[in-house]
Amino acid sequence: MSVVTEAEALAMNLPKAERGRLASKLLVSLGNPFEDDSDDIIELALRREKEMEEHPETVVSEEEFWASIEEYRRR
């Protein structure tokens, strides 16, 4: 069993509040994901906006987005 798998198994057995604290610490340890790529992020956002304007049928609502995330997590 890998260290990550072991850590995940241990973490999932923690009470919800402790899992939340651990998750928060892990997220903070990653730093700002946009720090080094701010120009790339802006370019991506502008490209996505143009795609949505040109193909509005591909746009999903926030509700549809979260439903798809939940469906993915159930797999």
Image (tube, rainbow, N blue to C red):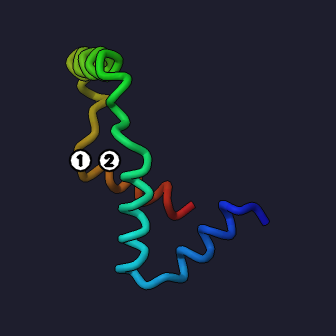
The outermost residue toward the right is 1
52 left or right of 74 in image: left
Which of the 4 image quadrants contains residue 30?
top left
User: Mark 2: few, some, or many residues within 10 Å (few <14, many ≥20)?
Assistant: few
Q: Is label 1 in a helix, a strand or a loop?
A: helix
* Whole-percent x, y for residue 44 in the image: 33, 19
61 left or right of 16 in image: left
57 left or right of 26 in image: left
Q: Is label 2 in a helix, a strand or a loop?
A: helix
Query: As shown in the figure, which amino acid type bears the numbered disc 2?
Result: Phe
* Whole-percent x, y for residue 50 in the image: 24, 15
- The residue under the point 39% across, 61% down is 25
* Whole-percent x, y for residue 67 in the image: 35, 56
Quarter of the image where the C terminus is located: bottom right
Calculate the distance from the C-alpha at mark 2 to the C-alpha at mark 1: 5 Å
Given residues 34 and 54, the one toward you in this image is 34
Q: Which residue is mark 1?
A: 62
- The residue under the point 35% across, 80% down is 17
- The residue under the point 37% across, 70% down is 21
**Count of numbered tags:** 2
Given residues 23 and 48, the one toward you in this image is 23
The vertical placement of 57 against 60, above or below, is above
Q: Is residue 42 visible?
A: yes
Given residues 16 and 73, the one toward you in this image is 16
- The residue under the point 30% across, 49% down is 64
Which of the 4 image quadrants contains residue 60?
top left
* Whole-percent x, y for residue 15 in the image: 43, 85
Query: As shown in the figure, which amino acid type bears the numbered disc 1?
Result: Glu
Marks 2 & 1, CB-CB < 8 Å contact: yes
Q: Which residue is mark 2?
A: 65
